[in-house]
Image: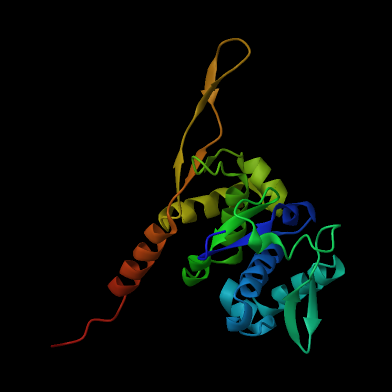
């Protein structure tokens, strides 16, 4: 595993969670991989990081607790130590170079000020990507069903990820049964995270107030 990334289990998309709950789980996983450098996380911290109200965050926290995915220890939120049937399954993930049942997300993801919806869509695309080509082509419907999001909302967040230099999208065409050409799903290419980081920094500098010399 790369030192600048963290692993998330593919099974997170099988627990019937919405985008906010998935984003919370992804953030807590990121925090877990930081080990001793990880600051404690509570509802307010998640609200600030994921740009969602504390009421919305609290509701999803309870959902994750009910599904036995996270726990509360002395008022702070932690990933449950086991999300597989094997007692060692989750904690051995960092030791493997290639992990069949998980996908990698870059640590820099949480420096880009993404909202929960953007994080959930991006995470799903990373879970689908071919690790040799960095490409995938799930439909808006497939993405929406995985993270409880309408087709229109998925499109909005896909467009946002394109604008923030996290992904490229390309139209595709397929041939129907009767030889008729029609539009296929978008082809997504995951861009190097450095592209998004540089864009975010440059965009932030542009928005700084001008000072008189």
**Image vertical order of residue 139 relative to residue 159, above or below:** above
In this rendering, the count of numbered labels is: 0
Q: Which residue is farthest top?
A: 178
Quadrant into which the N terminus falls: bottom right
Quadrant into which the C terminus falls: bottom left
Q: Nearer the viewer, residue 157 or 70?
A: 70
* Left or right: 187 as drawn, with respect to 36: left
Quarter of the rendering containing residue 147:
bottom right
Quarter of the rendering containing residue 50:
bottom right
Percent of width and height locating residue 60: 75, 70
Percent of width and height locating residue 91: 73, 66
Residue at position x 47%, y 34% in the image: 171
Residue at position x 61%, y 65% in the image: 116
Quarter of the rendering containing residue 166:
bottom left
**Image vertical order of residue 96 relative to residue 207, above or below:** above
Percent of width and height locating residue 209: 28, 81
**Image vertical order of residue 42 relative to residue 153, above or below:** below
* Left or right: 88 as drawn, with respect to 34: right
**Residue 64, visible in the rendered structure:** yes
Q: Which residue is farthest left?
A: 213
Percent of width and height locating residue 140: 61, 42
| Colour logic | rainbow
**Image vertical order of residue 85 relative to residue 178, above or below:** below
Q: Nearer the viewer, residue 39 or 3?
A: 3
**Residue 51, visible in the rendered structure:** no
Residue at position x 35%, y 70% in the image: 201
């Amino acid at each position: 595993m790369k030192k600048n990334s963290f692993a998330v289990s593919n099974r997170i998309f099988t627990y019937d969670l919405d985008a906010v709950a998935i984003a919370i789980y992804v953030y807590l996983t990121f925090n877990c991989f930081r080990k001793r450098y990880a600051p404690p996380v509570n509802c307010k911290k998640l609200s600030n990081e994921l740009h969602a109200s504390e009421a919305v965050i609290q509701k999803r926290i309870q959902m994750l607790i009910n599904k036995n995915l996270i726990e509360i220890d002395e008022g702070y939120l932690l990933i449950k130590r086991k999300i597989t049937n094997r007692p060692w399954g989750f904690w051995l993930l960092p030791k493997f170079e290639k992990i069949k049942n998980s996908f990698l997300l870059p640590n820099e993801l949480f420096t880009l000020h993404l909202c929960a919806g953007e994080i959930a869509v991006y995470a799903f695309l990373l879970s689908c990507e071919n690790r040799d080509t960095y490409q995938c082509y799930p439909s808006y419907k497939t993405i929406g069903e995985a993270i409880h999001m309408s087709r229109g909302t998925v499109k909005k967040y896909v467009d946002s990820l394109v604008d923030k230099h996290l992904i490229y999208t390309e139209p595709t065409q397929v041939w129907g049964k009767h030889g008729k050409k029609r539009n296929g799903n978008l082809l997504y290419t995951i861009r190097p995270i450095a592209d998004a980081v540089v864009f975010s920094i440059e965009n932030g500098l542009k928005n700084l107030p001008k000072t008189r010399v």
